[in-house]
Amino acid sequence: MKDQDCIFCRIAAGEIPSTAVYEDEEFRVILDLGPAAKGHALVLPKEHYKDITEVPEEVLGKAFFLAGRVGAAMKKALGCAGFNVVQNNGVEAGQTVFHFHIHIIPRYEGGPSMVTWKQGTADPEEQKKIAEQIRSAL
Ligand code: 5GP
Ligand code: ZN
């Protein structure tokens, strides 16, 4: 399904211009308009899925494989030391465009700083309960 009101559907279909680094029948990989670092790219499936929970297994596998390929190309071509693969689901998780996409963010020696979070602490008993809650919902 494609959604005419979805900006990433329209970008992936080539109806709205973007700077593409890769395209095939199922995906377009573009440079992010507000890059977190030089070369920040987005893997967009041409089909519309609102987030990762809607993406079929086969498409998801191809999308992440492609993210790895693009990251490897960034290391070769842009000289980044590494890259982050980031994927946001839901407003609270930072998703702003509700068409599934994968961020590939090159990381260079000397910055800008990488995607990070503050480490918390874990209580073993509580961890067991949490794991059980998640397991029972799978
Ligand atoms: P999210 O916050 O949903 O994970 O990521 C959305 C990303 O899409 C943001 O990094 C934002 O800069 C990028 N973006 C939003 N609109 C456009 C656009 O029209 N073209 C391109 N190339 N990137 C966009
Ligand atoms: Zn879409």
Image (spheres, rainbow, N blue to C red):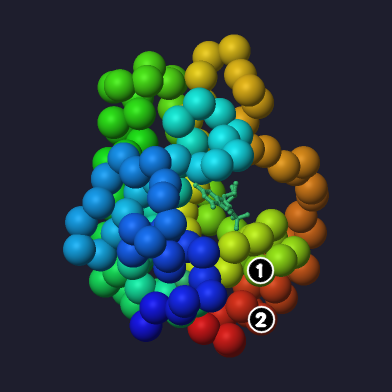
- Direction from residue 27 to residue 129 in the image, left or right: right
Tell me where residue 45 sits by quadrant.
bottom left
- Direction from residue 100 to residue 29 in the image, left or right: left
Q: Secondary structure at mark 1?
A: loop
Residue drawn at x 42%, y 47% is 18
Tell me where residue 118 sits by quadrant.
top right
User: In terms of depth relative to the viewer, which is nearer, 71 or 101?
Assistant: 101
- Direction from residue 57 to residue 36 in the image, left or right: right
Residue drawn at x 59%, y 12% is 110
Where is residue 15? Give x, y as percent: 38, 61
Quick one: label 2 or label 1, which is nearer the N terminus?
1
- The disc label shown at residue 90, or none: 1
Q: Secondary structure at mark 2?
A: helix
- How far is mark 2 from mark 1, CA to CA? 20 Å
- The disc label shown at residue 22, or none: none
Where is residue 23? Give x, y as percent: 25, 51
Q: Quick check: 79 above or below 72?
A: above
**Residue type at the position of mark 1:** Gly
* Residue 61 in view in this figure: no
